[in-house]
Amino acid sequence: MTLSSPRDSAPLVYVTSAIALMLGILPLPQWLSILWPHFLVLVVLYWSTMTPRAGGILVAFLAGICLDVFNGSQLGQHALALSLLAYLAIRLHLLTRAKPIFEQSLLVLVALFVYEGVLWAVDGWSGQRINTWTRWVAVVTSAMFWPVIVGLLGRLHRPR
């Protein structure tokens, strides 16, 4: 795989994913943590959609393992959920990129519900405490944050 520009390189994917991971593990007050978007999920979805060769299932899996370690959750649950989302984003990347930003936000909302649903199922199967409806609030705020992610990350690379 030949990269045409340093702005299209895989290190950019890893650096932005690391920044999103840091934003995801910030200690926040309870009320803000309920509303805080899933930045890592949004970044993984963005790179899997816009540059599927540079940002893909490996990035999603590694980011998910890191998130599991930092959150102290079941090892592999975020990796499983993020890898599933990356796979779906790669399979549907041509369809997703052709949509206007509002429709992309709706597709991201569905993807985020799938992500949170996988985490909810793993929590239930492993005997962990399943939270109340507040775990689903971040899904909606993350989908509303999608245009900002597209705007910021779109300036960092040159889409093909």
Image (tube, helix red, strand yellow):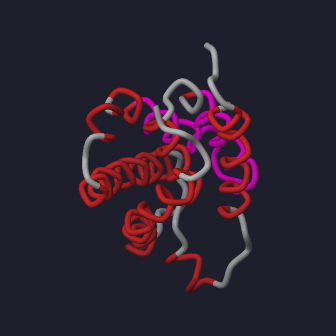
Residue that sits furthest to the top in the current view: 1
- On the image, the x and y values in percent for residue 14 come to 70, 40
Q: Quadrant of residue 97?
A: top left
- On the image, the x and y values in percent for residue 140 come to 37, 68
Q: Quadrant of residue 7?
A: top right
Q: Which residues are magenta?
A: 58-87
| Residue nearer the viewer, 134 or 12 | 12
**At 62% across and 42% down in the image, what residue appears?**
64
In this rendering, would 133 be left or right of 6?
A: left
- On the image, the x and y values in percent for residue 159 come to 48, 38
Q: Is residue 27 above or below residue 130?
A: below
Instruction: State how many labels appear.
Output: 0
Q: Is residue 21 magenta?
A: no
Q: Quadrant of residue 113?
A: bottom left
Quarter of the image with the N terminus in it = top right
In this rendering, would 96 be left or right of 23?
A: left
**At 37% across and 33% down in the image, what residue appears?**
88
**At 58% across and 37% down in the image, what residue appears?**
60
- On the image, the x and y values in percent for residue 24 come to 65, 62
In this rendering, would 101 be left or right of 67?
A: left
Q: Is residue 9 above or below residue 75?
A: above
| Residue nearer the viewer, 152 or 137 | 152
**At 35% across and 27% down in the image, what residue appears?**
91
- Secondary structure predominantly adopted by residues drawn in magenta: helix
Q: Is residue 51 above or below residue 107?
A: above
Q: Is residue 19 above or below residue 81?
A: below
